[in-house]
Amino acid sequence: MKLQLFIFLTYIVAVSAKYTANLNYRSPSEHHPFLGISLYKVARRNNPSVRYIDADQLNFTHGVASGDPYADSVILWTRCSPTYDNDKSNATVSGTVPLFNHDTQEYIQMSTAPVCVNYNVATDETMEDVVTSGTAYTTSDIDYTIKIEATGLEPFTRYYYQFNVCNSEKRSPVGRTKTAPVSKDEVPDVSIAVFSCSNYPFGFFNAFGNVARKDSVDYILHLGDFIYEYAEGAYGHGWSIGRIPEPNKEIRSLYDYRKRHASNRADLDAIASFGKFPWIPVWDDHEIADNIYRDGMAAQNNTEASFTQDDIENGGNGVSFDQRKMNAVRAYFEWMPIRQVEMDDNLRIWRSFSIGTLMDIIMLDTRNYDRSITDLYWNTDYIHEISNDAGRSLMGSRQENWFYNQLTQSKNRGAAWRLIGSQLVFSRENESLASGPENPFDYDAWDGYQANRNRTFQHLYNHKISNNIIMAGDSHLSWVSDLVWLDERPYDPTTGAGGIGVEFAGSAVSSPCPLGQNITMDTGIKASEWLVANNRELQWHDTYYRGYYELTVGYAGVEARYFGIPTLVQRTPLEVSLANFTVERDANALKRPVGGGVVASGALKEGKVAVGNVTNDTVTGAWSVHNLASFGYGQLVD
């Protein structure tokens, strides 16, 4: 009897380990365990006569992905499911509903047996030299996603990985990843691609694919808005190019957010990028909803009136803001190759990565964590009035103090550079040409939280923390600025003297500029010229192009390369080299002449624009000529 009990307990431990190996069963927050999945209930629900779902019923539906690299480990992700659709139950995020209330008429049938998947990590693409392996289970409770931490790896090393259904030859594509260096090691140059704002109905995610085709970087940073919450036609018309977002509604439920992630992740260029590079992503606002802050968003907040109105507008399917946020966060952690971060009192995504002695990457959450009220469109005058209130914070006091400590620790450990991922543009943005003189700044960005920005500048200057690179997205425009504390420290726009670093902000993978999707290049150039002329620290700006930028970081300096995508209405490997910039170590400003004195689009302070008509094919490396000056994003490229 004792032997039988021992065998049974051993079996239970082994099975439990296969569930716990899948990080998606955990809560996104270690201090909010109720957001996790009860493995006891999952196991209890299973049919004891079925060990796990047969391989013939399963497919790897969305390729593979990796992310959040450490020196000895990396996160690996896939989805192995008996259905291409997503699990429709909100049970895992609804505390008042039975955890497994899967009505088969309304929901996809609950899994009564786990999906069993093996994973292997190897040093070669043929997967022969396997260095670590393991097994993990998944079920309908987490949308059949699988996220594991591959451990015991060597630092700054390229690896290949693959999943396969247990006891079968059904395999995922082979993915590639790379670990981070040990924090005390000197390393060669490291290259990073920086993306933001991938809106599905506005066009194909060509920018993701171009970097994968060029194989030009070590890591990917995504600064948020990987998905958008809108229905077709609300912000983007995808019907003409076969890119209607799924589900075709404004997303609110857990199923909705899962389905929208699945829709974006099915883009072929997204699959290519996730499968080739480790990603370090953070969310912006649209992963949940527009202009979000701690207690609400532009169209919804935590009031009875807001809940009731949402209920009326959506046919009785109203959801509170907190519930909607919980749904979005659960889906994000299921679908993104991101680690569970040490939490305190909220849903934390802010974190940092040490890349040898070369740099620290500090990823902020300037949207969701503990953000004071923002510009919600109807309250712009009020936000303008309180924009310099000392009590306002873009990230909450806990994250602010963590951020300042990270900056100090990075300097003290001797890291050459500090790369700061901020969803929102940090530098001043005088946009009164569009917004009018009454409210000239973007109060949803750092301009609406001036005291928070001043505290950041004060910490950098007082502690003599130099060589800072801020990376931003969100605006759907490209901005390159010297990082300066205007009106507090002397600054010479001609030489850059007085700066404490540089800000590089990118446009968007596919989201349109504020002037619309189909503006002409001439219109874009005129808008950029006004912005450069009316913002002292702004050295280059581009309105017209969608695209991305790459940073190559070395001990002597940082090189930035901006690329534009000539069309979004078709898949294309073509791109345009827009501008190149250099930041030399300890200069704390862009190297003059900025951009080498000439760029291919936009407006350049103290330089000229020579509109280019040459595109690079990222598959073949061939160059070709197109009449880009009169080109529109609604046209095809031959």
Image (spheres, rainbow, N blue to C red):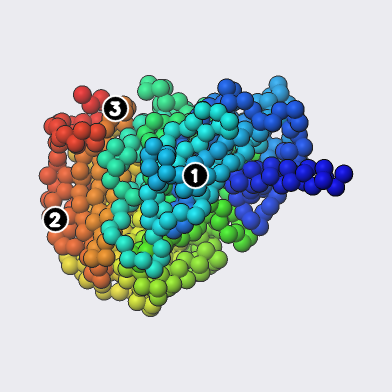
- Residue 271: image location, x then y, percent: 41, 35
Q: Secondary structure at mark 2?
A: helix
Residue 209 visible here:
yes
Residue under the point 14% across and 60% down: 593
Give the CA separation, mark 3 to mark 1: 37 Å
Give the CA separation, mark 2 to mark 3: 32 Å
Q: Are marks 3 and 1 in contact (CB under 8 Å)?
A: no
User: Label 3 is placed on what type of residue?
Assistant: Gly
User: Label 1 is placed on what type of residue?
Assistant: Leu
Please state, as top left, top right, bottom left or bottom right, where the N terminus lies in the image: top right
Disc number lying in front (2 or 1): 1
User: Label 2 is placed on what type of residue?
Assistant: Gly
Residue position marked by numbered label 1 in the rendering: 76
Residue position marked by numbered label 2 in the rendering: 596
Q: Quadrant of residue 19?
A: top right
Residue under the point 25% across and 68% down: 585
Residue nearest the viewer, comparing 263 with 607: 263
Q: 482 above or below 119? A: below
> What mark, if any, has residue 634 been given in the picture?
3
